[in-house]
Image: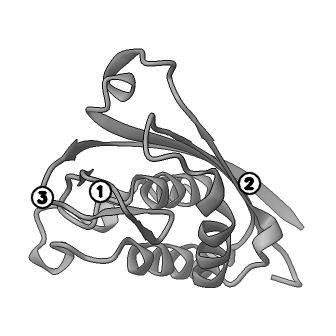
């Protein structure tokens, strides 16, 4: 079996008048993330990590923000398509380890739901999706609640059983 790892990072600005989508679920918050799609910063970081692990460039290459077909798209669709892209090269998702950086809203209670949703989209067990949340102790753009960021590390596998 061949294994590869990938790393992804994404950031989006918080603005009024947008829904907040994170980890494939809608969260109640007075601001949402700004982007061409639904701006789910966690899913975008995971997509970049998966694509990087498979040496397939990045999310912007496959799903450009200049393409009308991706305007306001549900990022779960982008994740599903990303999994299909790496599968076309013979890879499957092994596991995900991700961290969301946000001052608010507090995410701990919603993480199990995010794990279930993301696992379902990727066709893996929820135990293979680790999501952590942290703040930046009021430092930087995240600390000032101007935006959120996410980091993801993934393992993908290729082999006879994949």
Residue ID for mark 2: 4
Which tag is nearer the camera, tag 3 or tag 2?
3
Residue 128 as seen in the image, left or right of residue 27? right
Residue at image coords 90%, 68%: 1
Residue ID for mark 1: 60
Q: Earlier in the sequence, mark 2 or mark 1?
A: 2
C-alpha gap between disc 3 and disc 2: 40 Å
Residue 17 is marked as 3
Q: What colour scheme has been applied to the protein in the rendered image?
A: one colour
Examine the image and state in which quarter residue 71 appears.
Answer: bottom left
Which tag is nearer the camera, tag 3 or tag 1?
3
Q: Secondary structure at mark 3?
A: loop
Tell me if mark 3 has few (under 14), some (14-19) or many (20+) residues whose alpha carbon lies within 10 angstroms of its own.
few
Q: Position of residue 130 (x, y in %)?
A: 73, 55
Tell me if mark 2 has few (under 14), some (14-19) or many (20+) residues whose alpha carbon lies within 10 angstroms of its own.
some
Q: Secondary structure at mark 2?
A: strand
C-alpha gap between disc 2 and disc 1: 21 Å
């Amino acid at each position: 079996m061949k294994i590869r790892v990938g790393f992804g990072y994404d950031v989006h600005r918080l603005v009024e008048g947008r829904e907040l989508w994170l980890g494939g679920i809608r969260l109640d918050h007075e601001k949402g993330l700004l982007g061409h799609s639904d701006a789910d910063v966690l899913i975008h970081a995971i997509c970049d990590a998966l694509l990087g692990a498979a040496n397939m460039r990045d999310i912007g290459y496959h799903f450009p923000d200049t393409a009308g077909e991706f305007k306001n798209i549900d990022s779960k669709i982008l994740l599903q398509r990303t999994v299909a892209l790496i599968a076309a090269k013979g890879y499957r998702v092994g596991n995900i380890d991700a961290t969301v950086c946000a001052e608010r809203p507090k995410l701990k209670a919603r993480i199990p739901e995010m794990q279930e949703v993301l696992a379902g989209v990727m066709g893996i067990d929820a135990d293979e999706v680790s999501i952590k949340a942290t703040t930046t102790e009021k430092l930087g753009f995240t600390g000032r609640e101007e935006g959120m960021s996410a980091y993801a590390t993934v393992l993908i596998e290729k082999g006879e059983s994949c």
